[in-house]
Amino acid sequence: MFRTLFTIALRHLFGRKRQTLTTIVGVAVSTMVLITTVSLTRGLLDSFVETIVDVAPHITIKGEPVRSLPVDLLSDAEALRHAFVDENIQKEERKEVRNYGQVLNILSSENYADEIIAVSPYVESRVIVIKGGKNQPISMKGVEIEQENAISGIEDRLTAGNLSFFEKTPNALLVGRTVALDMGIELHDEVTLVPPSGPSRQCKVAGIFFSGVNAVDNTVYVSLKFGQILENLPADKVSGVGLKVLNPLANERLAGELERITGYNSTTWQEENAGILSLFNRIGFIVFSLVAFVGVVSGFGVANILVTTVFEKSRDIAIMKSYGFSSRALVGMFILEGFIVGFAGALAGGILATGSINLLASIPLEASQGPLTKTGFSMSWNPLYFLFVIFLTVLISAIAATIPSTRAAKLEPVQVLRDSSL
């Protein structure tokens, strides 16, 4: 029975070659566009996560002591208890990790040997960089360069200079490429750093780096000691400690444990980039909504050709029913036609999508894509996206075929054969 229905379905489709081909092309184009769009959206997200995991600390212990919530004295059961505020106007405390050597001892203990790969203390500040007649406020980060390199791999990201020159040069700078381009800074240039307090300092550019993360590339690195001097911090205090862990995608438990042990706020890279990740999720939702919407439009195209087939083949359907074909068999035959059209179009669209993805990925255009700067578009080759769009397209095409198939199943053979207009 299936073989017979399959043969009749093919004859119906090949009997209207032009309309069938047009429908298949429409389904193919929509499938290609959807796969390419999903690949671009997910590729940008995957590229962002991969870059952040490679460049940024996976967990950051910040100089923000974790304090318990104050007691609500007004609603306390003891009515005789009172609260007073006396000279509460005070200077805002600077965020710093005190005696950070103790924190480093905890992180380097055997308890965390299997979880923590690298540790890098740092000092953060906002400074003004002056070169010639140009000046610009930027972020400064003081680090132990070997430890920082273990986390961010900055040595591999240098476009000019090297780390040994940085270590040997007094008041040396590693300048992000964004800063270098904005201010016309080149290797070995002399620039002036103006800290928030204290005298300005003459510095020498020992290297220029490019990470691809716009926030990082708008930063300058100095040695940890020099950063402490610029921030007027004693040798036992830093702004925070960055960590690289073995499993960056499952680091919440470790961050919570370190926060409890050290007494300082510990944040994961996911929390640091929550806004950007949320934006990507919204974009992903919109894209998948678009996938469903365009798939429905493609389904209408499939339904249209089958409705025409039912109208033109009404006498054939009536004869088939008079020969004993059940209504269920006829419904299955038209759903099979919708499946064939949808599968052929989706398969062709998948093949076309590989070409469009390759084309976009090969365009040598450097552009800022959200928080990243990339050469070429970040495309994802995850086969699940191909399978998802193809499956959804075929499913919608098959479902769309139920509209004309139910009409065909309701035809009465005697009435159709007597009606001369059919």
Image (spheres, rainbow, N blue to C red):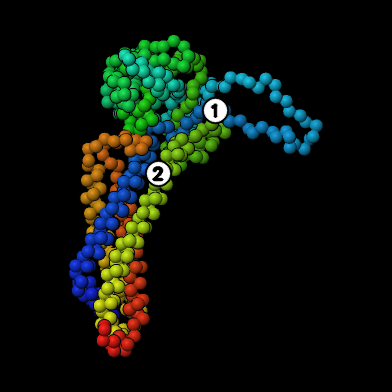
Q: Please give left or right for residue 127 compared with residue 22 in the image.
A: right
Mark positioned earlier in the residue sequence (1 or 2): 1
Front residue (pair 408, 237): 408
Q: Residue at x 33, y 61 (%)?
A: 297
Q: Which mark is residue 2?
A: none
Outermost right residue: 80
Q: Residue at x 35, y 33 (%)?
A: 213
Residue type of the residue flagged with mark 1: Glu
Q: Locate residue 210, reporting x and y percent.
A: 31, 28
Residue matched to label 2: 280
Outermost top residue: 199
- The image quadrant of residue 54 is top left
Front residue (pair 251, 201): 201
- Quarter of the rendering occupied by the C terminus: bottom left
Residue type of the residue flagged with mark 2: Phe
- Quarter of the rendering occupied by the N terminus: bottom left
Res 277 visible = yes
Q: Secondary structure at mark 2?
A: helix
Q: Nearer the viewer, mark 1 or mark 2?
A: 2
Seen in the picture, residue 137 relative to 323 is either above or below; the reply is above
Q: Locate residue 235, reporting x and y percent.
A: 49, 16
Q: Residue at x 27, y 64 (%)?
A: 343
At label 1, counting other C-alpha atoms closer than 10 Å, the crowd grade (few under 14, some 14-19, many 20 or more) is some
Residue matched to label 1: 64
Q: Secondary structure at mark 1?
A: strand
Res 162 visible = no
Front residue (pair 309, 144): 309
Q: Please give left or right for residue 181 compared with residue 246 in the image.
A: left
Q: Residue at x 32, y 15 (%)?
A: 133
